[in-house]
Amino acid sequence: MTAGKACLLLLFLLGSFTSFAQKNKNQLQQEKQKNLQKIKEVEKILTETTSQKKNTLGELSALNQRIESQEKLIQSIRNEMDFLNKEIGEDNGIIAALEEDLVNLKAEYASMLFAAQKANNSATRLTFLFSAASFDQLVMRLRYMKQYSERRKLQADQIIKTQDQLASQVKTTEAKRNEKNNLLNEELAETNQLTSLKTKQKTLVKNLEKQEKKLRSDLTETKKAIAKLDKMIDDIIREEIAKAEREAREAKARAAKNKTAVVPEASVALSASFEENKNKFSWPAAGFISDPFGTHNHPVLKGIIIKNEGINIQTKQGEKVRCIFDGTVRMVAVVGRLGTVVMVKHGEYFTVYSGLKEVTVREGQNVKTNQEMGTVAFNTDGIPELRFQIRKNTTALNPQQWLRN
């Protein structure tokens, strides 16, 4: 392959790489913007939480979420730097290849010029033409001389293009180096911010540890309220199961009597539709998970295990609570320190929203997806927090596996 053809191939590959790299770079920058937006949202909740009451578990939850968001931001910056390092390394390879091509192109062009100077002598050119053995050979020699002249012009143009491309590539690489330096400075600033947040976290944990007696008392009272709510939920669900079984037997008996097919219950279709929307449900309230599903250690009290059959979502003051799917309100009740509870039936599935105020729905009412049902109330720490559960009959499910990421 001649230097000219190699150069054309290199320029084609360079254009393809630039397009692909830009796509990946845009994805990394979008990821960073999402992390920045998340930090902004959590910071607002943290500021609001701190202004309500100092040294609370809600403040610790918000601070933990803020630290997690900060760590994700730093990682996204590092991913962007890694990508730039890879790009710069590949750019350096392209620059080296262009420089080598340029040397070869110039050498080829110098050889052409030398040969052209020798052939430019009129006597030499005439001798070359008229020494042809036939007229056809004369025509071929004229055509060759024309093509050789055109080839020299093409080679000169290729040298100019390669020089321009080399200059452009050097400029682009230098811009990437500057961008990398800016990212290094950004990472340093965000890392310092993370260190400051972790210092606050340690101080807050120490302050909360001094409130051990109060925390244990609050935990005991909360467990009692949760146990009461769980019994109410289980009783209602058992009633619904018994009712569904009774209606199914009656429907089967009617079908047998009338010799007709059994018509599926509407609740069966609703259950199937609910299942189809797994991982697609909108969140019942905007915020972050302050207490996840399942069993885990208490954030402050050593040796204490917490069991959560749903998730707790810490939000902003006055945040609206919305129904995640079509259904029927099965319960609206006040349960001690958990505040007002709304339970919605979706066939075999049930969603439970605890910690509401200004409730706008009533028992027996049909509700639609994303319909407002009330606002998030303050918990005993003065923090706006929603407790949210999803159940399939009496089995508690992890809401994070059902809600949209």
Image: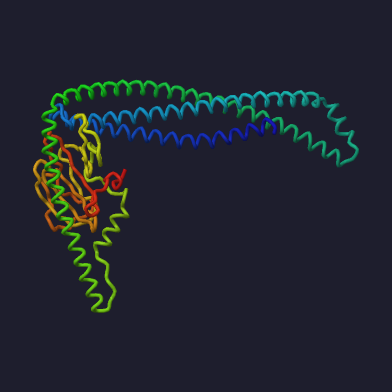
Question: Which residue is drawn at the image coordinates 86% and 33% (left, top)?
Answer: 129
Q: Position of residue 401 (x, y in %)?
A: 30, 46
The answer to whether residue 170 shows anywhere in this view is yes
Q: Is residue 69 left or right of residue 345?
A: right
Q: Position of residue 376 (x, y in %)?
A: 15, 42
Question: Which residue is drawn at the image coordinates 45% and 28% (left, top)?
Answer: 82
Q: Is residue 377 left or right of residue 351?
A: left
Q: Quadrant of residue 141?
A: top right
Question: Which residue is drawn at the image coordinates 79% and 38% (left, top)?
Answer: 143
Vertical side of 149 occupied by 182: above or below? above
Q: Quadrant of residue 184?
A: top left
Vertical side of 245 occupied by 396: above or below? above
Q: In this orientation, which residue lies closer to the viewer: 94 or 268?
A: 268
Q: Position of residue 307 (x, y in %)?
A: 21, 40
Instruction: Name the residue at the front extreme.
Output: 303
Question: Which residue is drawn at the image coordinates 49% and 28% (left, top)?
Answer: 86
Q: In this orientation, which residue lies closer to the viewer: 68 or 115?
A: 68
Q: Quadrant of residue 211?
A: top left
**The N terminus - image quarter:** top right
**The C terminus - image quarter:** top left
Q: Position of residue 287 (x, y in %)?
A: 23, 38
